[in-house]
Image (cartoon, grey):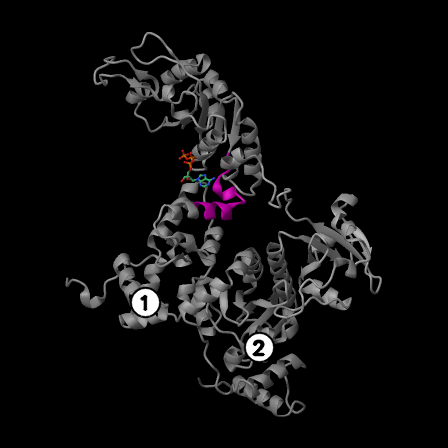
């Protein structure tokens, strides 16, 4: 690469600084940077006059690194996306690298993908100091602290237009887990312009680190300490995981610093010392049960303690572990409620609906389930049935909208032998009678013809059904659950629904929120994925990047769309995992980059008219890049040759020399 004048000056500055620190003009009086320059030359043998182009690890290695970081990636997702929303308008991209500097997550504008790939600000890029020279990620890994690498702080002349700021993320034992980085191509010359960037990245890295900590030690009591009573519940500055007897198990970065300050350092990861060396009483001047009982001894759930050494005041609050029964297992509810509980995780509307459903499940009243199409009304009806005392009796579902009007009466009420032309000679038991003792589910009740509404009303009022052509009614014991996505009051108003039937059916109502409003999408995705997976011969895993894309997608209300997307991904994926490229194209149209697209860039005009899914796109581009050399494309994509052939066949990609002549 020919060097420009400013690059030439940059190279000279590095060489002079390293040769004689006093003579050179470091870009800032930043010893971290000049130390790193020296390492680049002395230890890694890098030459500032020969800038190395970005290095990308092969696809298979990237996937391996992403798998290893999967737990963190899942926890970090919300934080990384929030950070991206904050900094993208200022022209930054966001990278999360593993502890060795390989970018395992990337967020940046898709429109600038070629520039990202050219600079190395992309998935799979190696930002270790040994390869990229002085840079925010690599130098942060070495220094184990947050820093900005601004313009000519970078070792490589290739990077001097960039400003990059990175912060480390440590695991609960002090081991480096990952590095969070934001980088921009254009920024003011002054280094101070990045002060804010440093604060945001540090803050987000701490948030991710603490979220990971809380997840890892979710089964322990976690003591949160702060020097301020007002902020201790919000800041959670120092986090310490403790055993019921007060032994310290782990601490976040700030917590480990606090312990060191009080001469109680926790062993670092891999150290041979016994792990639970200290008790919380060694830190705070209080009995362990006083500390573990904070929530019960204090109105605002905060208590002040003196530290044993230094007599500093710290305010403490406690995150209690899940309650355990006498058997040591987390306390169990009534197991018959399991079908209802399985419908949702932690969504506020669903929580209210399910509490109500649990109370109503054995009450002798009919229930109306209300919700948009595909929000799980039938699921709810089944779960009500399965968790009720009627669970061993039939559940009969009828879709009032789908049944032809000519058949609906005979299907519902049944008929006597020979009661009309075309009837079966033995007669037929109607669906209502089949549901005797159990639950009758009337879906799309708003579409039931008026004349049948009258007959249904009679069945409900008298608990008996009169088959067509019969002279005597049959007694039935029914619980009716009806469902609708329509506004029944509006239908009553316009004369299309009987008001008296509405009150019969609406003994109580349960409302289901649309998917777009649900806070437990992650749970629904995992649950549906497991269900579809369970129907298959071989089991497949949903990888973190696919999960992130599914969570980021603005789903409309209908859960069926999510179901279809997962079914598609499971049907088309290769191997034993679903990755982001296996998802339908519309799910990946957000800002998230695809891991598979991380190698090289190509002319977008190379798209065949038929190639439009990410999988097709990716494979096609790789094949074009390698002049249809299957082995080379396979190597680049980290796949085997048979897999490439299989995918080409499945995705309808035909090499030019095998295409039929016009
Ligand atoms: N809580 C849930 N957990 C997992 N999957 C669910 C849940 N609720 C609904 N689904 C899935 O979503 C799809 C739609 O569910 P369901 O048929 O119960 O909705 P509905 O509201 O009755 O639909 P419609 O309005 O079309 O009658 C089904 O594939 C179902 O398996």
User: Is residue 551 placed above or below 380 in the rendered structure?
Assistant: below
Q: Which residue is depicted at the point 60% across and 86% down? A: 38
- Most extreme residue toward the left is 661
Compare marks 2 and 1 and give the one earlier in the sequence: 2
Disc 1 residue crowd, few under 14, some 14–19, many 20+, Cα 10 Å = some
Taking 638 as reference, is 323 left or right?
Answer: right
Is residue 90 in sight in this rendering? yes
Is residue 107 in sight in this rendering? no
Q: Nearer the viewer, residue 508 or 222?
A: 222
According to the picture, the residue beneath numbered tag 1 turns out to be 640
- Most extreme residue toward the top is 471
Q: Quadrant of the C terminus?
A: bottom left
Q: Which residue is depicted at the point 37% across and 26% down? A: 400
* Mark 2 residue element: helix
User: Is residue 476 placed above or below 629 in the rendered structure?
Assistant: above
Secondary structure character of the magenta stretch overall: helix
According to the picture, the residue beneath numbered tag 2 turns out to be 151
Q: Which residue is depicted at the point 44% across and 35% down? A: 379
């Amino acid at each position: 690469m020919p060097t420009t004048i400013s690059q030439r000056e940059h190279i000279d500055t590095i060489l002079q600084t390293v040769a004689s620190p006093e003579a050179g003009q470091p870009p800032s009086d930043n010893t971290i940077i000049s130390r790193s320059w020296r390492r680049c030359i002395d230890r890694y043998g890098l030459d500032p006059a020969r800038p190395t182009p970005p290095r990308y690890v092969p696809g298979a290695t990237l996937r391996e690194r992403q798998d290893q970081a999967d737990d963190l990636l899942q926890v970090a997702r919300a934080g990384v996306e929030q950070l991206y929303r904050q900094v993208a308008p200022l022209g930054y991209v966001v990278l999360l690298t593993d502890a060795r500097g390989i970018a395992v997550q990337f967020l940046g504008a898709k429109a600038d993908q070629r520039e990202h790939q050219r600079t190395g600000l992309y998935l799979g890029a190696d930002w270790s100091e040994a390869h990229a020279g002085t840079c925010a990620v690599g130098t942060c890994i070495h220094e184990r602290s947050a820093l900005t690498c601004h313009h000519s702080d970078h070792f490589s002349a290739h990077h001097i237009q960039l400003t990059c700021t990175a912060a480390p993320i440590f695991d609960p034992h002090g081991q480096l887990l990952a590095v969070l980085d934001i980088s921009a191509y254009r920024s003011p010359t002054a280094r101070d312009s990045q002060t804010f960037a440093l604060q945001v990245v540090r803050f987000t890295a701490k948030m991710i680190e603490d979220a990971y900590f809380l997840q890892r030690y979710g089964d322990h009591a976690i003591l949160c300490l702060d020097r301020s009573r007002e902020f201790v519940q919000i800041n959670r500055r120092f986090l310490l995981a403790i055993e019921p007897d007060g032994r310290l198990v782990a601490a976040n970065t700030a917590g480990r610093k606090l312990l060191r300050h009080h001469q109680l350092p926790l062993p670092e990861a891999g150290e041979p010392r016994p792990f639970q060396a200290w008790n919380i009483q060694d830190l705070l001047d209080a009995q362990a049960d006083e500390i573990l009982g904070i929530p019960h001894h204090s109105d605002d759930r905060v208590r002040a303690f003196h530290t044993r050494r230094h007599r500093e005041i710290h305010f403490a609050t406690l995150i209690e572990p899940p309650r355990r029964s006498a058997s040591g297992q987390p306390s169990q509810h009534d197991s018959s409620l399991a079908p209802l509980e399985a419908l949702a995780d932690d969504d506020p509307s669903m929580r209210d609906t399910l509490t109500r459903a649990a109370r109503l499940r054995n009450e002798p009243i009919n229930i109306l389930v209300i919700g948009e199409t595909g929000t799980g009304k039938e699921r709810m009806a089944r779960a009500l049935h399965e968790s009720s005392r009627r669970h061993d009796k039939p559940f009969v579902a009828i879709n009032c909208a789908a049944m032809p009007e000519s058949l609906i009466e005979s299907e519902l009420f049944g008929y006597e032998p020979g009661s009309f032309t075309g009837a079966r000679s033995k007669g037929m038991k109607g669906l209502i009678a089949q549901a005797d003792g159990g639950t009758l589910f009337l879906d799309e009740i708003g579409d039931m013809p008026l004349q049948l509404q009258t007959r249904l009303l009679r069945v409900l009022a008298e608990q008996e059904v009169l088959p067509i052509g019969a002279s005597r009614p049959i007694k039935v014991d029914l619980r009716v659950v009806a469902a609708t996505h329509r506004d029944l009051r509006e239908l009553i108003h316009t004369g299309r629904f009987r008001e008296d039937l509405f009150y019969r059916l609406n003994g109580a109502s349960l409302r289901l929120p649309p998917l777009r409003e649900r806070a437990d999408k992650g749970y629904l995705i995992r649950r549906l994925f497991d269900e579809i997976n369970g129907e298959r011969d071989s089991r497949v895993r949903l990888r973190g990047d696919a999960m992130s894309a599914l969570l980021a997608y603005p789903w409309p209300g209908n859960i069926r769309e999510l179901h279809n997307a997962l079914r598609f991904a499971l049907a088309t994926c290769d191997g034993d995992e679903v990755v982001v490229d296996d998802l339908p194209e519309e799910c990946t149209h957000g800002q998230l980059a695809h891991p598979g697209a991380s190698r090289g860039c190509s002319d977008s005009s190379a798209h065949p008219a038929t190639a439009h899914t990410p999988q097709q796109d990716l494979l096609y581009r790789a094949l074009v890049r390698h002049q249809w050399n299957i082995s080379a494309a396979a190597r680049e994509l980290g796949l085997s040759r048979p897999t490439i052939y299989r995918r080409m066949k499945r995705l309808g990609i035909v090499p030019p020399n095998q295409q039929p002549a016009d």
